[in-house]
Image (cartoon, rainbow, N blue to C red):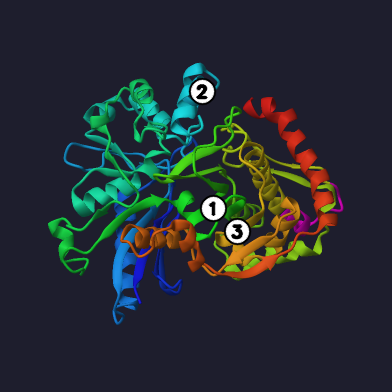
Amino acid sequence: MAFMIGIDIGTTNTKAVAFTDAGVVLATAGASYAALSGPDGRYELDPARLLEAFIAVLKEVRAKTAHLEGFAGISFSCAMHSLIVVDKGGQPLTNAMTWADLRSKPYAEALKGSETGKRIYRQTGTPIHPMSPLFKLLWLKDKEPEIFRQAGKFISIKEWLWWVLFGKYQVDHSIASATGLFDIYTFTWYGESLELAGITPDHLSVPVPCTHTESVLTPSYRSSLGLPEGFPFIIGSSDGCLANLGSRAMRPGETTLTIGTSGAVRMTAAAPEYDPRERIFNYILTDNLYISGGATNNGGGVVQWYIGQLLGKKGADPAVLNDLVAAADNVAPGSDGLVFLPYLQGERAPIWDADAKGLFFGIRSLHGQSHFMRAVLEGITYSLFQIGASLEETIGPIEHIYASGGFTHSKTWLQLVADVFLKKVFVTNVADASAIGAAIMGFYALGFTGDLADSAGMIRVQETYEPDEGRHRIYQERFAVFEELYDRLKDLMDR
């Protein structure tokens, strides 16, 4: 038996999983951290805390598997769209600006809809939005000129950890493809984006395939990590792309729907799928596989907001959260006319509007707490359904859905997704799809498997949720109101 440790570095926590080439989870570990946020749109992570979390989860899983033979390698998954400025010695000059940082909104808005913006979207696969590191660079150049001038490199979270471990500035094609700076057709830095940002390729890492492997750790980590000399680390891919691999959604029509803090709907394709309406992204999984889809800013984090801020149960035991969500089952589909727009953090796909706001609409005296809870779940799901519709228009029909992320613990929410989409929803045996995907990528890189689509057979379906046509018709009526609400109110939201 061989096993790989997949490590997923996310926006709120880092997770590690030891996964065998027979599809068995041997051990898991996790470490969370707080974001540094502000009313100006700042949403950052401390690089030092990210490094601590990575070391902690690696050591914990290593301790749990120390008695086992067959440890083959360590492979990485990481959140996209982050930016850290480091000096010429590799020391961070800034925190990690995450995908949720909206300070660059004016710079994205100025480019959206322009001919330059359209070319950048087509060539880089990254929609024009403040999440993109391209616009973070424009903000830094304008608002933090001294830091911009001192920069040795502009890198992502994974690149910084890779530099700490190996002393090399390298970026996998997948993370690079989510920057707005990388040509997804030529696998090189895109000149028009670099010129706009006022940088050169020397300011960026060397792009490498997602199977790229390093094995010579920097002196300070050779002994502290307790690994044999020459042990392989695989650079891996991005979290969203690896969620498809870790959910077994690798063939036409197979779709992943992920809800964690944020959420996403994605399909795998052999080539980028251009959307003239610029609703979907095209990111690289490997050099001959692309992941097309859309991400919402507003997933499980909205549920946490509702329970913590409005119900006053911040930091409540997970069992309390589960009970509140389950209680929403006592309310009929459609929440008796209550409709919720979940845009608490602005929105990415498919509307790409950083000024979008949240809204409860249609409140009447009959509505109680469970109505509001159900409306929150329905609103998040409608937003994901919009993304799915964009994908179907661009790529082709959704055959069925593989669910991943924290929401898979909720039978109520899983059934809601099946009914809204009118598709079967499968829940697999994986602990974390992105970390599992990283492990599978590691096996692929080291030659344990020759085909990523076939390796999806390592993942087994544990539960299936069948859609109900009657409930679907009700949801379609409410969804029409959901869409029209945003269209009518978006100008007022901007004001």
Q: What percent of the width, then of the height, locates residue 331?
A: 81, 60
Mark closer to the chain start, 3 or 2: 2
Task: Classify the position of the N terminus by image quarter.
Answer: bottom left
Q: What stretch is highlighted in magenta?
A: 364-375
| Of residues 454 and 247, the one drawn nearer to the viewer in this rendering | 454
* Proximity of marks 3 and 2: CB atoms separated by less than 8 Å: no
Mark closer to the chain start, 1 or 3: 1
Which structural element holds mark 1? loop
- Label 3 – label 2 distance at C-alpha: 32 Å
**Label 1 packing within 10 angstroms: few (<14), some (14-19), many (20+):** many
Amino acid type, label 3: Tyr
Q: What percent of the width, then of the height, locates residue 310?
A: 66, 52
Indicate whether residue 456 is drawn in magenta.
no
- Label 1 – label 3 distance at C-alpha: 18 Å
Which structural element holds mark 3? strand
Q: What percent of the width, then of the height, locates residue 225?
A: 22, 66
Q: Name the residue under label 1.
A: 261
**Label 3 packing within 10 angstroms: few (<14), some (14-19), many (20+):** many
Select label 1 or label 3 by which is in front.
3
Amino acid type, label 2: Lys
User: How many numbered dots are placed on residues in this image?
Assistant: 3
Image height of 358 relative to 146, above or below: below
Q: Which residue is drawn at 45% across and 74% down?
A: 24
Q: Mark 3 points at which residue?
A: 402
Which structural element holds mark 2? helix
* Proximity of marks 1 and 2: CB atoms separated by less than 8 Å: no
Select label 1 or label 2 by which is in front.
2
Q: Name the residue under label 2.
A: 118
Q: Which residue is drawn at 43% across and 73% down?
A: 22
334 relative to 406 in the view: left or right: right
Mark closer to the chain start, 1 or 2: 2
